Image (cartoon, rainbow, N blue to C red):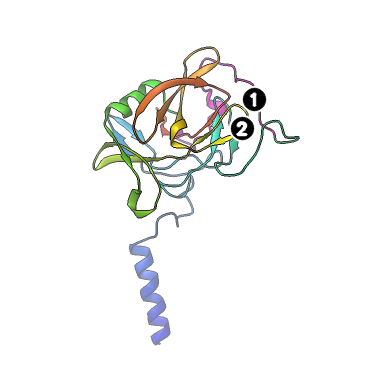
Amino acid sequence: MKTLSKHLTIGLIISLFPFYGMSENSATQDEGIVINGVRWATRNVDAPGTFAPYPESSGMFFQWNRKKGWSATADIRGWEENSGWDYSRAEGTAWYSGNDPCPPGWRVPTQEQLISLYYAGHEWISNWNNTSIAGRTFGAYPNQIFLPAVGFRNTFAILRVEDRFGFNYWSSTQSSSTGAWSLNFSSTTSNVSGYSRANGFSVRCVVAE
């Protein structure tokens, strides 16, 4: 009876205080945080159609207007046989819905939404929640999200994680026929700038309207 009682007690505790990420739907669902009228996901996109498990998780990289995800850690090269990396620049005037890697009900943010997030305030954090993960918070507490300093893949799929290169998050808005806008930041600065569409950047989704 003591063993049964112990198991029942543990089950009750778990049901009342579930661990983050334990839900079967956690990979595709996120309550999000509203900042300047826009609901932002709290986690990066991981495999297409899913969120990374935690706010500090890297997730995957995506070339602009393409849905295929790329590892944020593995050492690949675009010219290697069968790597699958496409070093051309995707065509299009926007990130089309059919290529959107966000989970259902979410989408890649526009340039305007990234600018709104930028002006909501931001701060470099070198050890977010004692995870040893660096990045920037955007917004004002408690309406605040954390974007980890993941790095990116350049147009040849080479992984760049050094602070001097900055860390990038895509928008769905073109900046030119070969470029698109992204949120770029480092430990010292942050801005919204245009970059080649062939780069592999992180994606942080907003609720689809």
Give me the residue at 39% from left, 44% from top. Answer: 134
Q: Position of residue 29 (x, y in %)?
A: 44, 44
User: What secondary structure characterizes most of the magenta part?
Assistant: loop
Q: Tell me which amino acid carries mark 2.
A: Ala
How far, Cα to Cα, is label 1 from label 2? 8 Å
Q: Residues within 10 Å of mark 2 (few under 14, many from 20)?
A: many
In this rendering, the answer to whether 80 lies above or below 178 is: below
Give me the residue at 69% from left, 33% from top. Answer: 84
Given the current orientation, which residue lies at the most extreme front position? 164
Q: Look at mark 2 in the image and give the residue it sits on.
A: 157
**Residue 86 sits inside the magenta stretch:** yes
Q: Tell me which amino acid carries mark 1.
A: Tyr
Do the numbered discs 1 and 2 sit on residues whose CB atoms are within 8 Å? yes
Which of marks 2 and 1 precedes in the sequence? Answer: 1
Instruction: Please indicate whether residue 86 sits to the left or right of residue 4 in the image.
Output: right
Residue 189 lies in what quarter of the image?
top left
The segment highlighted magenta reads: 84-106
Q: Residues within 10 Å of mark 1 (few under 14, many from 20)?
A: some
User: Callout 1: helix, strand or loop?
Assistant: loop
Residue 185 visible, this orientation: yes
Q: Quadrant of the C terminus?
A: top left
Residue 166 visible, this orientation: no
Q: Look at mark 1 in the image and give the residue it sits on.
A: 87
Instruction: Please indicate whether residue 159 sits to the left or right of residue 54 in the image.
Output: right
Residue 14 lies in what quarter of the image?
bottom left
User: Callout 2: helix, strand or loop?
Assistant: loop
